Image: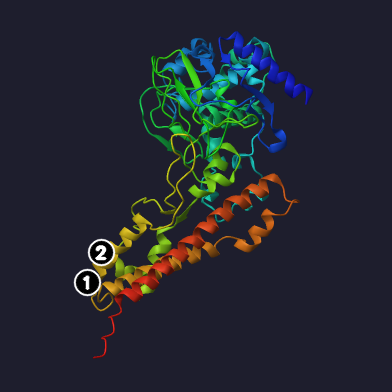
């Protein structure tokens, strides 16, 4: 406890020495480890809306412009790797910041960011670091194919680790030199730190994409990422109460970075300002990562909260829909293909169908006020409708009319949703029981929360389709003639 508090105090002293401003009269950094949240920022008194809580100077940000590493290795940061082998692509923004973070970490007391680096996490609860036994608890969830530890190892070993080892005198100096395994472990740690905390420092709203290695990266390799001290102490939830923003007289900021992205543009200071008018003494100041399912919050940040469950989603494989359609129509997959119906084309890499609620976005004060409702699955239902239109045209005996088309569509939907629900290794009742069990580990509990959220979503979806089918059935029946 004493060491933890001492590190916090050293960081605060450093932050102010770098030109940062912190409203000590309104807020304080507290130890929230008992709640599984590390550090957090808590209100010391009631705080009105539009109050600036702290200001971060651009010079305090860790990136390729403020670190000395790019100046020491200009060829690495400005051009492709020197070796003319398979991998000749220049390092991207993600890899650049990993290298910078490794370098600053290895500098120890020589790094101007040492007090900041000392409060960053050294271990993570993201699935990337789970054991095989722990990962088994995620079977059936959307995370099954999204973790990608092996692919991440391969990328770091080919793109990041060689730069460190081939420039040992720069990275290690006179200190102890690490081997390949140790550098790889450090690269994973820094990569996870960046995924959880880094900001996008460019002013173009380019897209971000997810790679096979399980990281989320910037599509444009030339984008700059940076670690922003103090901003990353804010914990986050789907229901939040602050907004990072640059002084409007200087530049704007947009919250779109990996679900928390700051466009710092050319402004000098990042201001974090309250949104709500009712932040009370003792409230935690919360940020916003965006509308994402519990599974994605766990994958990126290593935690789960009940508020994110409204955004939960389930992926339905195209192959399952194709099989269900074949069964419902009595046509084989080859027959469906012959008449022009290919929901699961072999030669195309189509995304699976997403089942999710219409959840709405937080209002201007960061509150979740709209109910999360289940009403339709637009993409899946549209493709089913188009497929059944083709079948009706080619095989009118199979789909005779609109009522038959709707019956088949509802049958297919219920089948694929029910099959998906049955694909989890545990039942919804077992997960509800496990969620109340105080003996299970923290990671096991988070896995249960993720898969339980998906199962609740599936049950809602099945109930919605069945209810809609009943309404359709009644609406199709002709009204009885009244007696005279």
> Which mark, residue 340?
2
Tell me where residue 8 sits by quadrant: top right
Tell me where residue 2 sits by quadrant: top right
* Residue receiving disc 1: 394
Q: Is residue 68 above or below residue 291?
A: above
Q: Seen in the image, is 271 located left or right of residue 1? A: left
Q: Residue furthest bottom?
A: 484
Q: Seen in the image, is 391 located left or right of residue 188? A: left
Q: Position of residue 372 (x, y in %)?
A: 46, 51
Label 2 with label 1: CB-CB less than 8 Å:
yes
Q: Nearer the viewer, residue 438 or 440?
A: 438
Q: Position of residue 408 (x, y in %)?
A: 35, 72
Q: Seen in the image, is 44 located left or right of residue 382? A: right
Element type at mark 2: loop
**First along the sequence among labels 2 and 1:** 2
Q: Is residue 447 above or below residue 169?
A: below
Q: Position of residue 480 (x, y in %)?
A: 28, 84
Q: Is residue 210 above or below residue 198?
A: below
> Which mark, residue 215?
none
Q: Position of residue 125 (x, y in %)?
A: 64, 39
Element type at mark 1: helix
């Amino acid at each position: 406890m004493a060491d933890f508090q001492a590190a916090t105090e050293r960081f605060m002293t450093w932050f102010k020495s770098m030109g940062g401003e912190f409203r000590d009269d309104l807020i304080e950094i507290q130890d929230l480890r008992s709640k599984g949240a590390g550090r957090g920022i808590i209100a010391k008194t009631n705080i009105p809306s539009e109050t600036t809580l702290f200001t971060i100077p651009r010079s305090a940000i860790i990136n390729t412009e403020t670190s000395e590493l790019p100046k020491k290795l200009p060829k690495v940061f400005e051009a492709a790797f020197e070796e003319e082998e398979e991998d000749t692509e220049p390092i991207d923004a993600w890899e650049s910041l990993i290298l910078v973070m490794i370098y600053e970490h290895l500098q120890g007391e020589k790094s101007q960011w040492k007090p900041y680096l000392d409060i960053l996490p050294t271990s993570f609860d993201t699935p990337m670091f789970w054991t095989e036994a722990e990962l088994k608890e995620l079977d059936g969830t959307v995370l099954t194919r999204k973790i990608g530890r092996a692919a991440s190892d391969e990328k770091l070993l080919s793109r990041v680790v060689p730069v460190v080892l081939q420039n040992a005198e720069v990275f290690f100096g006179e200190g102890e030199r690490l081997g390949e395994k140790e550098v790889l472990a450090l690269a994973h740690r820094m990569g996870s730190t960046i995924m959880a905390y880094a900001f996008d420092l460019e002013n173009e709203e380019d897209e971000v994409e997810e790679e096979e290695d399980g990281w989320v990266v910037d599509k444009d390799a030339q984008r700059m990422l940076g670690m922003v001290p103090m901003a990353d102490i804010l914990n986050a939830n789907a229901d939040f109460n602050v907004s990072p923003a640059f002084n409007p007289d200087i530049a704007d900021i947009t919250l779109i970075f990996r679900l928390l992205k700051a466009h710092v543009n050319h402004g000098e200071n990042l201001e974090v300002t309250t949104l709500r008018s009712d932040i009370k003494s003792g409230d935690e100041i919360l940020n916003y990562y965006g509308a994402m399912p519990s599974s994605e919050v766990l994958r990126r940040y290593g935690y789960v909260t009940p508020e994110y469950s409204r955004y939960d989603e389930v992926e339905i494989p195209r192959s399952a829909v194709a099989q269900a359609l074949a069964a419902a129509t009595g046509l084989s997959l080859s027959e469906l293909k012959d008449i022009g119906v290919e929901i699961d084309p072999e030669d195309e890499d189509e995304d699976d169908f997403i089942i999710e609620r219409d959840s709405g976005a937080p209002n201007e004060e960061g509150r979740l006020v709209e109910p999360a409702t289940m009403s339709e699955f637009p993409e899946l239902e549209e493709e089913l409708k188009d497929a059944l239109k083709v079948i009706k045209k080619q095989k009118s005996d199979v789909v005779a009319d609109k009522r038959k088309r709707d019956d088949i569509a509802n049958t297919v939907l219920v089948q694929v949703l029910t099959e998906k629900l049955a694909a989890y290794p545990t039942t919804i009742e077992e997960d509800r029981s496990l969620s109340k069990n105080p003996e299970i580990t923290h990671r096991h509990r988070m896995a249960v929360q993720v898969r339980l959220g998906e199962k609740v979503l599936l049950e809602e979806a099945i109930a919605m389709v069945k209810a809609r089918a009943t309404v359709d059935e009644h609406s199709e029946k002709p009204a009885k003639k009244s007696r005279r």
